[in-house]
Image: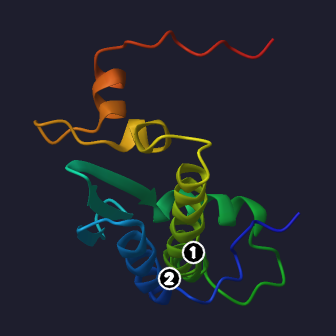
């Protein structure tokens, strides 16, 4: 199976689509940032006074791509070049993933399947700047996942 979005080409164009989608939904604030050291893309927006923050991992996508596209004996690139290619592919893919995920969440809200809070609960920002999910994980408010048998 091919990793979804591995052949995406829209890249930062998808960021413009995200901004248009959020504005159309009624968000009045929007911002994005790339953290090269962490290998993440961050999108923040505000809807009716609620601030949300979505973080997508370029490094995580690149690692998944590398698992699926291992270097073979006939490969003409070095390991470093192969890893750089994975990061380049990941940096394009995460924008398309974010766009499609946000479109799905907003559609679920607009059709009454979810409330805004239900769709973005883990991504809502608390007054201290943490997301609700970060706070829940830090405070160990959820039981540990069950291990596989």
Q: Position of residue 124 (x, y in %)?
A: 31, 42
Q: Position of residue 31 (x, y in %)?
A: 24, 71
Tags 1 and 2 touching, CB below 8 Å: yes
Rendered view: 108 above or below 122? below
Q: Residue at x 59, y 59 (%)?
A: 107
Label for residue 111?
A: none
Q: Quadrant of the C terminus?
A: top right
Q: Position of residue 74 (x, y in %)?
A: 84, 84
**13 relative position to 72: left or right:** left
State which quadrant residue 7 falls in.
bottom right
Label for residue 96?
A: 1
Q: Residue at x 58, y 79 (%)?
A: 89
Q: Mark 2 sits on what residue?
A: 14
Q: Residue at x 74, y 67 (%)?
A: 4
Q: Residue furthest right?
A: 1
State which quadrant residue 47 falls in.
bottom left
Q: Position of residue 9 (x, y in %)?
A: 62, 89
Q: Give the SS element for disc 2.
A: helix
Marks 1 and 2, the one that precedes in the sequence: 2
State which quadrant residue 54 falls in.
bottom left
Q: Residue furthest left?
A: 128
Rendered view: 116 above or below 147? below
Task: Give the CA separation, mark 1 to mark 2.
Answer: 6 Å
Q: Give the SS element for disc 1.
A: helix
The residue carrying pointer 2 sits among few (fewer than 14), some (14 to 19) or many (20 or more) residues within 10 Å by Cα, namely: many
């Amino acid at each position: 199976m091919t990793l979804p979005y591995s052949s995406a080409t829209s890249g930062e164009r998808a960021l413009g689509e995200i901004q248009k989608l959020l504005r159309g939904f009624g968000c009045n604030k929007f911002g994005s940032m790339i953290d090269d050291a962490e290998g993440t893309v961050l999108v923040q927006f505000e809807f009716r006074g609620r601030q949300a923050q979505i973080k997508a991992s370029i490094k995580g996508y690149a690692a998944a791509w590398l698992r699926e596209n291992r270097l073979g004996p006939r490969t003409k690139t070095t390991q470093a070049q192969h890893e750089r290619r994975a990061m380049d592919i990941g940096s394009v893919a995460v924008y398309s993933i974010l766009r499609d995920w946000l479109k799905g969440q907003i559609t679920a809200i607009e059709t009454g399947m979810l409330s805004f809070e239900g769709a973005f609960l883990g991504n809502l920002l608390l007054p201290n700047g943490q997301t609700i999910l970060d706070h829940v994980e830090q405070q160990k408010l959820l039981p540990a996942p069950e291990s596989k048998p």
